[in-house]
Amino acid sequence: MTDARPLQIAIDGPVAAGKGDIAVRLAKELGLVYIYTGAMYRALGLACKKASVDTKNQTEVLSLLESTAIDLVDPDPQSSRAYKVLLNNADVTEELFTPEISMAASDVATVAAVRGSMVKRQQEMAEGKRVVMEGRDIGLRVLPNANLKIYLTAGLEERAKRRQEQLKREKGLERLFKDVLQDTKERDIQDTSRGADPLQKLPAAWELDTTNMTQDQVVAAIKKELKHRNLL
C-alpha cells in the first residue's frame, strides 16, 4: 500500500557530495518524486552561453531568464538519468555537465533575483507531492518546512575524486586530479560566499559525512533516520 502521508526531504551540500545519486536512490526506493534543482541553474548557464550573455552580468542574466523556458520532465525510457531537462522545449540534458557549464551555473546562481524566480518555480513543482529535492538552498529557501533536512557532505579530496570519476564515466572527459581539485575548491568558495542564499548547514539539518561510505550505506543511514523520526 502506498504511503499517502506528506513527505518532503531536502538534501543540501557542497558540489560532488553525492546528493544527486542518493536523491535518485531514495526516490526510487521510497516512491518519491525527484527534483534536481541544480539542473535548472545549469540550463540557465547553458542558455547564457548559447546567447553570448555574460554570466556575471546580472541584468542580462535576469532578462534572459524571463524569456527562457526551463522544464524538468520524466526521462526517456532508455535514458540512464532520472530526469530530462528542456531548454525552450529542446532536450539539453547531456549538455549540462561540462566544467564550463558548472561554473556558469554557479555564476548565475549568485544573482538574487534569479534565485528568487527559481525558488518559486521549484516550490510549485513540489507542492502537494511526496518529494526528495537536492541542491544548495533547499532546506533554507525552497522547502523550509521539509520533514527531513539533510546536509550531505564529504572531504574535499574525496569530492574531487568523485567528480573526476563522474566526468570520465558520463562525459568521457579525462582531467588531471589537481585540476578537478582546484575546480572543486573554487565552487566551494563561490557557493559559500555568494550574497544570495550562500551554501550553509542549517541548525536544524541532519549532517551526514559520506567520505568513507558506500551509496548503500548512505541510503541505509537516511532510511534509519527517517524511521527514527517516524517518517517511514
Image (cartoon, rainbow, N blue to C red):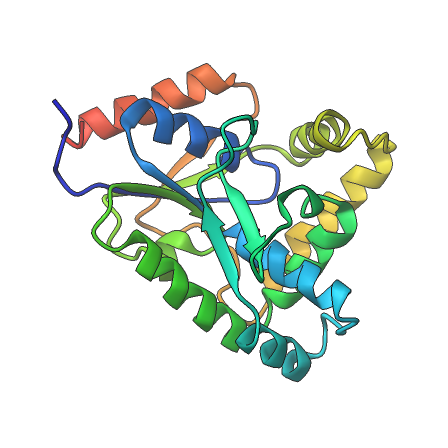
- In this view, 40 is above or below 152: below
Q: In the image, residue 190 lies at what x, y percent? A: 66, 59
Q: Is residue 184 left or right of residue 205?
A: right
- In this view, 199 is above or below 175: below
Q: Which image quarter holds the C terminus?
A: top left
Q: Quadrant of residue 217?
A: top left
Q: Is residue 191 visible?
A: no
Q: Which residue is found at the position 40% from the left and 53% from the top?
A: 138
- In this view, 125 is above or below 69: above
Q: Is residue 119 visible?
A: yes
Q: Which residue is found at the position 75% from the left and 45% from the top?
A: 98
Q: In the image, residue 90 lies at what x, y percent? A: 61, 54
Q: Is residue 63 left or right of residue 204?
A: right
Q: Which residue is found at the position 56% from the left and 53% from the top?
A: 86
Q: In the image, residue 11 lies at what x, y percent? A: 41, 42
Q: How many marks?
A: 0
Pick whichever, 134 or 190, lies toward us: 134
The residue most toward the bottom is: 59
Q: Which image quarter holds the N terminus?
A: top left
Pick whichever, 4 or 211, lies toward us: 4
Q: In the image, residue 140 lies at what x, y percent? A: 37, 58
Pick whichever, 124 or 180, lies toward us: 124
Q: Which residue is found at the position 72% from the left and 70% from the top?
A: 55
